[in-house]
Amino acid sequence: MNHTARKLLVGTVGAAGLFLATTATANADTTHKVAKNDTVWDLSQKYGVSIQAIETLNNIDQNSHLIVTGQTLKVPAKDAQVAKNNAPAQVTDKKADTANTSEVTVKAGDTLWTLAQQYNTSVEKLRELNGLAADAYLIHPGNVLKVNGTVQATQQPAQTEQPVQQQAQPEQPVVQQEATQEQAQEPQLVVSANHTTHTVQAGESLYSIAQAYGVTVDSLRAANNLGATLLVGQTLTINDPAKDPAQEAAAQQAAAQAQQEAATQQAATQVQQPVQNQAPAQTQAPAQQVQQQAQPAQVQQPQQQVVSTSADGAAIAAYAQSFIGTPYVWGGSTPSGFDCSGLTQYVYAHFGKQIGRNTIAQESAGAHIPVSQAQVGDLLFWGTPGSTYHVAIYLGGNSFVAAPEPGQSVKIGNMAYFMPSFAVHVN
């Protein structure tokens, strides 16, 4: 009997010790290491305790509710035990809430958290009631969700829920963000107050159009929604055009007309002069006629035509200006690209005058004169004779036309900013 009693006593003490250990474990505080995106509200929901209990136990500021990733928090077990004891009541409430469900249509800006606050329920209940994943946050306008509870008549902002609002804020602009992304995909066109339009013609390119209007290709792209290729008939917006192609075409036409008139006048002079020399020969005596026949060269040889400097120079100046906008090309001597001496050579060759290819050779094309005595159409040089480095065609006043330097195009310059060294009147 004593042996049996001893066994019974030991068993009783062991059971009592196990009960006490279990009770101590249940009443002991739980620790939680803060993970990324954790909030006090999340922990209160996870462990079934109040936000205030967690913040009081861990000395957390109840205004900011700030916790740091990696921080170790104590979670009181008292509220957890109360939650455990109240579990049957929660199950009963859950059944009652399920029976009282209603439907709500999601509006722009709605989130699971705002709906839970509005209907006095929790995010977890909304997820469970609508079959959403445990980590689901994204909802879209037009979705129909089941909710339980009623809309709160007055919503009092609780300071303890601010961290949750901060966490939920990235969810609210989801729909707006999608719309913003769609808007961002559409390029913002830039149209200035001073702009014109151009209809694309066959054979044109962005480069040729930019050159015609004195703008850059980048400005054309910024002002127009362009695809991979230009389409004939497509209308382009030209911002702040520096040139007017219509006016330049008129200038070219005027230059061509002046050139044609000069050629016509030259031909008429060449025909008229031999006739005037032959007219007196018809009234001369036979002896004179014999003498004229002996010296036919003296009678019939026409004098060399001398075109007036003003008329010839104006035609040269007008023709040179027809190439404004042509890109500068080192060594270029054609309308596809000029350097400074290539432009002057090409213009003078058009009028039958060969002045040489480079500036040194062109210095010898005529008489050297001071810049103050230069006439329209004369050559202007920069540098000392024998070592000049730039040449242009004088337009009158302080203006000249030239192919300036790489990266620029043929344009009109001003002697007030770039004074020539001397001028040459081409023979």
Image (cartoon, grey):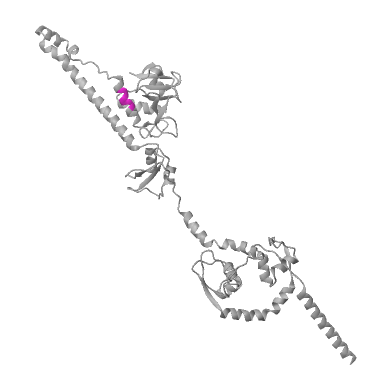
Residue 208 drawn above or below residue 225: above
Residue 59 drawn above or below residue 297: below
In the image, taking residue 196 as reference, residue 12 lies left or right, namely: right
Q: Furthest residue to the left?
A: 286
Q: Position of residue 32 (x, y in %)?
A: 71, 67
Residue 243 drawn above or below residue 347: below
In the rendered image, which quarter is residue 122 located in?
bottom right
Q: Quadrant of the C terminus?
A: top left
Residue at point 76% right, 76% down?
Answer: 26
Residue at point 27% right, 27% down?
Answer: 259
Q: Is residue 189 magenta?
A: no
Q: Main secondary structure of the magenta part?
A: helix
In the image, taking residue 18 as reference, residue 39 lies left or right, namely: left
Magenta stretch in the rendered image: 312-317
Residue 116 drawn above or below residue 181: below
Q: Furthest residue to the right?
A: 2
Q: Position of residue 346 (x, y in %)?
A: 34, 28
Residue at point 76% right, 71% down?
Answer: 29
Count the numbered circles shown. 0
Q: Position of residue 148 (x, y in %)?
A: 57, 75
In the rendered image, which quarter is residue 96 located in?
bottom right
Instruction: Evaluate whether residue 58 shows in this view.
Output: yes
Q: Nearer the viewer, residue 153 or 203?
A: 153
In the rendered image, which quarter is residue 169 located in?
bottom right
Q: Furthest residue to the top?
A: 287
Q: Nearer the viewer, residue 235 or 275?
A: 235
Q: Furthest residue to the bottom?
A: 1
Q: Quadrant of the N terminus?
A: bottom right
Q: Position of residue 331 (x, y in %)?
A: 41, 30
